[in-house]
Image (cartoon, rainbow, N blue to C red):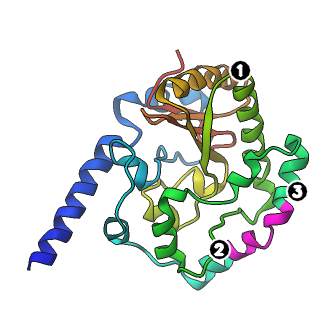
Amino acid sequence: MKVKLNGIALVFALGLALAGCQGGGNGNDEFSSNTAENTTEAPVDTDSEDIADHIHGESPVSEELQSLGCVRASSSQKAQVNAGTDKKDEFLRYCAAQTNGSYWCDQLVRPNPRSVNTFRCTYGSSQPHNLIHPDENTWKYPVEAVKIIQDLTAKGIKVSQIYNWWRPEPYNKNVGGAKGRHPYGTSIDVRFGSNSEADRAFRELCKMRSQKRLRAIGHYGSSSLHIGVGDRLANTWGKSCR
C-alpha cells in the first residue's frame, strides 16, 4: 500500500508542475487574436518543454517519475527513428554546408540530454540517442533555426544549448509535449545563458517574425525559447511580441 501511495503522490506532483508551467492561458496572446495569421490547417496546441524543464528550478527529474506512464515505441515507430538515424551523417553534412560548419548542427541530432531516461524508457537502452527526422524536406527548418541562432550570438546574446528538434511519438508524449510542432520537425527549443538573455533573444526573434523569417515563438518563462521556423500555426505564447 505504501508503494502505491508514493506513486500516486508522484503523479499528483507531476500534474501540478505541468499545469503551472505549460504554455497557453493568459500569456497566449496571439493564439486567439491573430486569426488572420493562422493557416487553414487544423490548429494545434501550444508546445511544451520536456518534463525536466517543467519542474520549477529546472532540476532533473528522477527516473521513477519519468517512468510513470511511459509509452513504449512500437516496432514501426522504432523503424521510423532508425530511418532518421541512418541519415545522421547526411544531415550533418547538409547542415554544415548551409551554416558554414556550425557546431550547433551536432546538437540538433540528439534529444534533450535531461530526458535521457525517458528516451531509454521509450526506445530501450540499446537505441542510439539520436533523433533525426527521416523526411529530408523538414531539414530546412532546423537549419534555418541554426542560422537564426548564429545571428543572435553575433549580437552578443549567449546561447547555451539546443535541446529539441524532432520529437516523434510516443517520445513526445512521454516528455509532456503537445501533438503539434515538434513531431513535425518544424521547430527547435533553445536554452540561453540566463532568463535575461532569453528575453533579449525574444525581442530579436519578434523582429524576425515580423519579417516572416519564422512563424512561432514560445516563451517558457525561463531561459528557454521555442523557435518555430515552419510551425503550422503562426503565433506566440507565454509572452507577447509588443
Q: Are marks 3 and 1 in contact (CB under 8 Å)?
A: no
| Front-most of residues 235 and 218 | 218
| Above or below, 206 relative to 230 | above
Q: Which residue is found at the position 45% from the left and 36% from the top?
A: 220
Who comes first in sequence, dot 3 or dot 1?
A: 3
Q: Which residue is found at the position 71% from the left and 62% from the top?
A: 133
Element type where label 3 sits in the image:
helix
Name the chief secondary structure element in magenta. helix
Query: What span is colored magenta in the figure?
Result: 81-90
Q: Are marks 2 and 1 in contact (CB under 8 Å)?
A: no
How many labels sit on residues?
Answer: 3
Question: Alpha-carbon distance for marks 2 and 1?
Answer: 35 Å
> Does 153 appear in magenta?
no
| Residue 123, horizontal then vertical, whole percent | 54, 77
Tag 3 residue: 93
Element type where label 2 sits in the image:
loop
Who comes first in sequence, dot 2 or dot 3?
A: 3
The type of residue carrying mark 3 is Arg
| Residue 121, horizontal then vertical, whole percent | 46, 75
> Dot 1: within a 10 Å radius of its alpha carbon, few (fewer than 14), some, or many (20 or more) residues?
few
| Residue 116, horizontal then vertical, whole percent | 51, 65
Q: Quadrant of the N terminus?
A: bottom left
Tag 2 residue: 128
* Furthest residue toward left: 1
Q: Which circle marks residue 155 in the picture?
A: 1
The type of residue carrying mark 1 is Lys
